[in-house]
Image (spheres, rainbow, N blue to C red):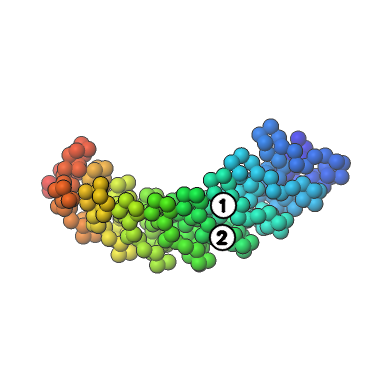
């Protein structure tokens, strides 16, 4: 379809010609995408400006409620977002799961796109149905520059999701020390437990992220806190590392002052955890 081809290549002049000849500029292709969808995904601001001049709407949504602004934000196209904003497209549009363009930009690590959304009035603290904020998205991807941009804009960096997980939990799961350091520089608490009593240190230890544990320790986060939950038996991050066979994580915890001889509330030691999961190397390291 000529309009799709022109939009995909950002050829605004061709779109103007097609409009004058009466060619449809908002018809979907076999995949359900309109020319505007293709222009937004490719970041062609001039094409996005040409389409509404010809009467093509910019408010069409694809499957699951994904709008043009989601496509542009997810691909990091700041100029396209600015063009959509000038055309009156809602920058806080939500997908069926409550995902906003700011989530897409943060998840992709696109600072310029996030800043364009902020200039257009988008809410940088928007939460999905699960309570996930742009800070969670940035932390999960290890995007420290996005976290710094969010901090500079005053966006919440410690807001928990519905399970009590904070962006620090997301950064710990990702294992990126730079993301944790960015949160720490912004004054974000790094030791807050979630609803199950699990701290970011537990998450980092369970995933074997030694560098993340070192970053947490440098920031003053507790690295030997017991899980405060009825069904967790008071396991420490070291228990989690031992159960996963993560020797480097255990060594990082020891350097940070965590007690490797600790028992949980049922008397279970790190050696018990390592033995139960068959991690011989960890057992040998603990015995030394």
Q: Quadrant of residue 78?
A: bottom right
The numbered dot on residue 177 is none
Q: Position of residue 45 (x, y in %)?
A: 70, 52
Q: Position of residue 245 (x, y in %)?
A: 24, 42
Please indicate whether residue 40 sits to the left or right of residue 235 in the image. right
Q: Of helix, strand and loop, which one carries label 2?
A: loop
Q: Which residue is mark 2?
A: 123
Q: Which residue is mark 1?
A: 100
Residue closer to the observer: 272 or 77: 272
Q: Is residue 171 visible?
A: no
Q: Position of residue 156 (x, y in %)?
A: 47, 62
Q: Is 143 drawn above or below residue 39 in the view shown?
A: below
Label 1 crowding class (10 Å Cα cut-off): few <14, some 14-19, many 20+? many
Label 2 crowding class (10 Å Cα cut-off): few <14, some 14-19, many 20+? some
Q: Residue at x 79, y 45 (%)?
A: 15
Q: Earlier in the sequence, mark 2 or mark 1?
A: 1
Q: Residue at x 64, y 61 (%)?
A: 120
Quarter that holds the N terminus = top right
User: Distance between the Cα atoms at labels 2 and 1?
Assistant: 9 Å
Total number of numbered labels? 2
The answer to whether mark 2 and mark 1 are in CB contact below 8 A is yes
Q: Residue at x 77, y 37 (%)?
A: 2
In the rendered image, the residue lying farthest to the left is 287
Please indicate whether residue 266 sits to the left or right of residue 204 in the image. left
Q: Quadrant of residue 121?
A: bottom right
């Amino acid at each position: 379809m000529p309009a799709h081809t022109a939009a995909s290549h950002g050829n605004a002049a061709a779109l103007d010609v097609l409009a004058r000849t009466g060619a449809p500029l908002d018809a979907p292709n076999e995949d359900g995408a309109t020319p505007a969808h293709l222009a937004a995904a490719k970041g062609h601001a001039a094409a996005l400006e040409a389409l509404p001049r010809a009467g093509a709407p910019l408010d069409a949504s694809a499957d699951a409620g994904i709008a043009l602004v989601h496509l542009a934000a997810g691909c990091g196209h700041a100029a396209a977002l600015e063009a959509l904003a000038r055309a009156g497209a809602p920058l806080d549009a939500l997908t069926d799961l409550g995902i906003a363009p700011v989530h897409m930009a943060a998840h992709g690590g696109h600072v310029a796109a996030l800043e364009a959304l902020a200039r257009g009035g988008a809410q940088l603290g928007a939460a999905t149905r699960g309570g996930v904020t742009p800070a969670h998205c940035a932390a999960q991807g290890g995007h420290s520059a996005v976290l710094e941009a969010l901090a500079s804009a005053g966006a919440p960096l410690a807001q928990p999701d519905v399970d009590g997980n904070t962006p620090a939990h997301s950064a710990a799961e990702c294992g990126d020390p730079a993301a944790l350091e960015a949160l720490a520089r912004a004054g974000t608490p790094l030791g807050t437990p979630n609803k199950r009593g699990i701290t970011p240190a537990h998450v980092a230890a369970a995933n074997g992220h030694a560098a993340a544990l070192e970053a947490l320790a440098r920031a003053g986060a507790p690295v030997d806190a017991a899980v405060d939950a009825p069904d967790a038996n008071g396991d420490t991050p070291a228990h989690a590392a031992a159960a996963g066979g993560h020797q480097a994580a255990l060594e990082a915890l020891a350097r940070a002052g965590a007690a490797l001889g600790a028992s949980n509330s049922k008397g279970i030691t790190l050696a018990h955890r390592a033995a139960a999961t068959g991690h011989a190397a960890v057992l040998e390291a603990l015995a030394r």
